[in-house]
Image (tube, rainbow, N blue to C red):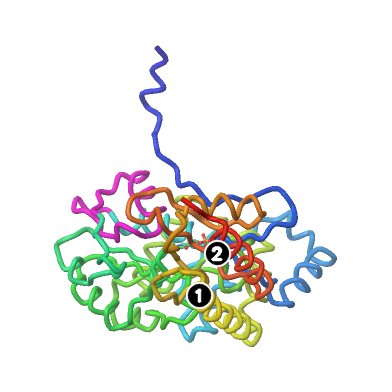
Amino acid sequence: MASWKDNVRRVEPYVPGEQPKVQNIIKLNTNENPYPPAPGVEAALKAFASQDIDLLRKYPDPSASALIDTIAEYYGMDSDQVFVGVGSDDVLAMAFLTFFNSEKPILFPNISYSFYPVWAELYRIPYEKQPLTDDFKINPEDYYKDNGGVIFPNPNAPTALYMKLDAVEDIIRHNQDVVVIVDEAYIDFGGTSARDLVNKYENVLVVQTFSKSRSMAGMRIGYAFGSKALIKALNDVKFSFNSYTMNATSLVAGVEAVKDKEYFEEHCKMIVATRERAKERLTELGFTFPDSKANFIFAKQEKVPASVLFEELKKRNIFVRYFKQPVIDQYLRITIGTDDEMEQLFVALKEIIDGYSI
Ligand SMILES: *Cc1c(COP(=O)(O)O)cnc(C)c1O
């Protein structure tokens, strides 16, 4: 028997949502933004192609300073309080590697971003999942116990529930001997960021992304705020792993996306407005859901099983996300699309629900 097989690192990989190859679908399954990135992004990429293509010959700036400085200025932080990576998945993976090196288990919610247990397994970090309440809330007291670190999304995914800043701070206050990571992938859709807490607590890392609120999932840009000490530790690990994480075009496009505050804020507002209308329509269609502060709604229909809705929508070329796992297998996670896409979703849902008999 080939003994090299004994030495292979075996992991159960994260399964991302489907990216169907077919055209003309309504794609509400991976929480992408339905609107294009800020116009400056397109202009900058065109200018790059026509004037700066020679930059592709060279290595990009390993410190990503143009992007870091722009993010720092936008959010009123110092540049040495900001870290960037290839999507927040890269930032989070690097943070797990950097900060979670205790023998004690790290803590995160049992219903949450399913990448957390995957990274913990990959890096052999012990972990303990903390149950949500029956109405899907994170109970801060579950995080008071001795642990090797804490991570949770706010708003949580896939529930979309937002936890108020004082509850976030309560968890941080009880965990000042470990690193606490707040994953704010969806914070721009109505929550208050924990960003300012990084000036108050040296052990807090706040992670955000360009993938959802800045319409740039394909560009792969994520970032984190933390104390200088945390950011230095992250950079030391990053430069021990891969110096050139941010490619030349991401750096240019990222800067342009951040510069256009008005476009960003306006489009976040549009998604929030569509989401609030969607809550009304879904209620009329017999759905219940935790109150979303994200760009998706986690909803359950009173009569039709989620698996049936999922398959029937798919037949109509409408993709939503369905998790075939205990506790949440009656729910669909529906990304907020344009008003037009949502209207087509509601029409399809009505047809499926009206036609359903057991
Ligand atoms: C989407 C998402 C991310 C990662 O997004 P990137 O595209 O890698 O920036 C991280 N955490 C949560 C909770 C998410 O939903």
| Residue placed under numbered mark 2 in the picture | 31
Dot 2 falls on a residue whose secondary structure is: loop
Element type where label 1 sits in the image: helix
Query: 343 left or right of 106?
Result: right
- Residue 125 in the magenta stretch? The answer is yes
Q: Is residue 285 above or below residue 258?
A: above
Q: Earlier in the sequence, mark 2 or mark 1?
A: 2
Q: Position of residue 111 (x, y in %)?
A: 34, 58
What residue is rendered at 32% in x and 63% in y? 151
Residue 298 is labelled as: none
Q: Is residue 313 left or right of residue 107?
A: right
The residue tagged 1 is 284
Q: Amino acid at mark 2?
A: Asn
Label 2: how many Cα within 10 Å (few below 14, some 14–19, many 20+):
many
Amino acid, disc 1 = Glu
Q: Nearer the viewer, mark 2 or mark 1?
A: 1
